[in-house]
Amino acid sequence: MNVEMNMNRNEYLKSVKNRLDSVGDGFCAMKWLHETLYLHTGDNHSCYHPRPRNVPLSEIEKDPSALHNTNWKKWQRKVMLEGQRPSECYYCWNIEDLEGDHFSDRVFHSSSDFAEPLIETLAELPWDQPINPKYLEVSFGNGCNYRCGYCCPQASTLWVDEIKKHGNYDLTYNQYGIDFLEKGTYYGPKDDNPYIEAFWKWWPSLRKDLHTLRITGGEPLMNPGALQFFDLLEDEPAPQLELSVNSNLGVSFNKMDRMYTRIQSLLNNKKIKKFSLFTSIDTWGEQAEYMRTGLKCDHWERNLIKAFDMGFQVNIMCTFNVLCVTNFKSLLDKVIEWRKKYGKNAVRFDTPYLKEPPHWMINILPKEFIKYMDDNLLYIQNNEWFRSDEYEKFKRVTNYMKENPVSKEKIEQGRRDFYVFFKENDRRLNTNMLEVFPEYTTFFNLCKKVYENYD
């Protein structure tokens, strides 16, 4: 890593944090400028750390911008402006309360080019004033060809199919239920959806202020509403817009190639400003494929390399979880391989720690596993192919695992559920976790004892 660049970046982040803290210790521009919207369930949040909350239909009937500016979110803005920390944002408070200096995503995200210039402006706005986001991540449906272990039916139709076939899991913390299908909080692709209707009413106003539009899923290329955006941008160009797509890269080569070709046409004709591809993988090889049922690394890599060949910016999101710890270096080696061939800036990666469900948290691992984290951190630090911010982000995950602010009760809950989930998961999928992750054998037996003695 470039030491001088690292120092300059850290100084810049410190200056952003000081400006945020001058408004309040909990102030974050994302509550105003960032929106993630799940139109098939009517849920939203201002970043992916707080849990999504349902948008009341009564609010969007009055004002379609309430898809972003809900009364709940306005109240959270008020809390921030009054110098307090919203409890739903505990992901960042966990990082900021660690010993030493650590930048949470409150700082990283507020330092982005669409947010940083507006920090003082936002601080002067009335807390209840509606505002259009600069960065919108939108999902039109949960159609997906993957069944990632820590995901849920709300984001994957494969999970829906499995729970319908095999039933729910016997977990103390269970996110795999499908009750939402019968409770009127889910809209399929053929249903009349008031949230999609409100979105298109909001769009003419929204598009004027958007800096980035990020289409997500499920898998966007399996959801018709997502594909409509390409047609829309052909007919109604947005030359200021940075377009992004979250894809699992697991769809057919032809389908990915068609999307790449359409995007290249939009760029060539200046109908959008920029394109970025976001994709997720948590380690490499058979361990990565175990975590994300449906993933085939060679297929995924072929679609990734086509994006490099097209000259697109690629961003890899690694949800750092309990099964990443021992084999993460395999992914780091792949990042180096891609950067050597396509350039250091061709691919970026981020390592947010997974905070739920408990049986996927790194916090449930014994301290013996910290040696893997230290080795991974040192590997990033001493390798010129990694960026300073990538080192800082992995450093905070390592320190979070070491200090482990999670309660003993939640750790016991996670270990109990770890045993139950993976035992049943292997039965359903005809897999064997301990053959894929033999270094977890002692830990698995520990979790079995916790299960047997769990009240």
Image: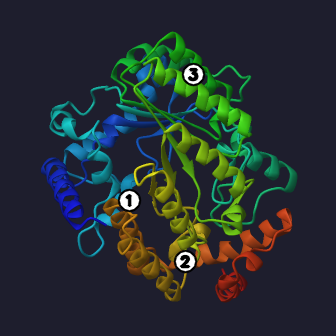
Query: Mark 2: which secondary structure?
Result: helix
Q: Farthest residue in the front direction?
A: 341
In the image, which is nearer the foreground, mark 3 or mark 1? Answer: 3
Q: Name which residue lies at 65% across and 55% down.
A: 175
| 10 Å crowding of disc 3: few (<14), some (14-19), many (20+) | some
Residue 135 lies in quadrant: top left
Q: Which tag, 3 or 1, sits closer to the chain's start?
A: 1
In the image, which is nearer the foreground, mark 2 or mark 3? Answer: 3
Residue kind at label 2, given as amino acid type: Ile
Residue 37's spot in the image, x, y percent? 50, 34
Q: CA distance from mark 3 to mark 1?
A: 36 Å
Question: To which residue does mark 2 refer?
Answer: 364
Comparing 316 with 154, the one in front is: 316
In the image, which is nearer the foreground, mark 2 or mark 1? Answer: 2
Question: To which residue does mark 1 refer?
Answer: 90
In the rendered structure, the answer to whether residue 365 lies left or right of residue 285 reads: left
Query: Mark 3: which secondary structure?
Result: helix
Residue kind at label 3, given as amino acid type: Phe
Q: CA distance from mark 2 to mark 3?
A: 43 Å
| 10 Å crowding of disc 2: few (<14), some (14-19), many (20+) | many
Number of numbered discs on residues? 3
Q: Is residue 450 above or below residue 379?
A: below
Is residue 118 at least partly visible in the picture? yes
Comparing 425 with 41, the one in front is: 425
Q: Which mark is residue 230?
A: 3
Residue 351's spot in the image, x, y percent? 46, 61
Q: Is residue 276 above or below residue 100?
A: above
